[in-house]
Structures are given as C-alpha cells and as structure tokens.
Image (cartoon, helix red, strand yellow):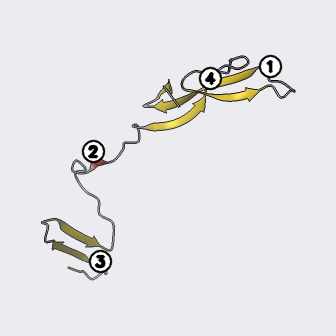
Amino acid sequence: LGDDSGWHFYSQRNTDDSVTFAVNGQITPSNYGNFDARYQTKTGGVQDVRLGSAIGIGRGGNAPSGHLLSGVDGGESVNWANARPVQVLINGVWRNVASL
C-alpha cells in the first residue's frame, strides 16, 4: 500500500506462517509485550566494571578467587604482589565477581 507522501507498506505471510512486514518509514508499536522479553533491559545485565581496593598477597601467593594481579614488586626478586577484586554493576548494585 502507498500514499501520496511516498510511504509504502508491504506484508506477506510466509510458508512457515510467519509474517514479513516492510515499511520505508518508522513503526512505533503500541504494545512491546511480544518482544521485550527477548532483549536485555537497560537495567539488567552488567552496566559497568571496575576494580576494588588492592590487597597484599605476599610472595608466591595466589590471588583470591575473583581477583586479578594488579601490582608486582619490580626489583630483582619479587617481595610483594597486590591483587584487586573485579567488580560488576548489576541493577545499580556493585558485586564482586566470584571467579575468573
């Protein structure tokens, strides 16, 4: 279907019973309920990532679960190392990552 302004609308039922719509403009649905659940909301999922406060893990130690190595003594032998927790912002709440 077309109009005097050049807008065109085309619909077709496919063999699998799905429907194809083609419009050369913008469609604004009145109800988003049929597809919102398929997409992550703006408040869901990871919104940001940061590193928490450094902790000393000493020589030869391992960083705790969810931490990454963030600093190492640069001398001839390693005398100290630091680790920091990886944190994620989900739904407005900062949380430590459980494991890396």
Earlier along the polypeptide chain: callout 1 or callout 4? 4
Distance Cα–Cα, label 2 vs label 3 = 30 Å
| Residue occupying the point 67% across, 21% down | 54
Earlier along the polypeptide chain: callout 4 or callout 2? 2
Q: Label 4, on which residue?
A: 63
Q: Label 3, on which residue?
A: 7
Quadrant hosting residue 70? top right
The one nearer the camera, 11 or 58, is 58
Mark 2: amino acid: Ala
Local secondary structure at mark 1: loop
Above or below, 2 against 57 in this view is below
Q: Nearer the viewer, mark 2 or mark 3?
A: 2
Q: Label 1, on which residue?
A: 79
| Residue occupying the point 23% across, 54% down | 30
| Residue occupying the point 70% across, 20% down | 60
Above or below, 75 against 9 in this view is above
Q: Which mark is residue 18?
A: none
Local secondary structure at mark 3: loop
Q: Are marks 2 and 3 in contact (CB under 8 Å)?
A: no
Q: Are marks 3 and 4 in contact (CB under 8 Å)?
A: no
Q: Nearer the viewer, mark 3 or mark 4?
A: 4
Q: Is residue 78 left or right of residue 89?
A: right
Residue 28 location, x and y as percent? 29, 59
Q: Are marks 2 and 1 in contact (CB under 8 Å)?
A: no
Earlier along the polypeptide chain: callout 2 or callout 3? 3
Q: Which mark is residue 37?
A: 2
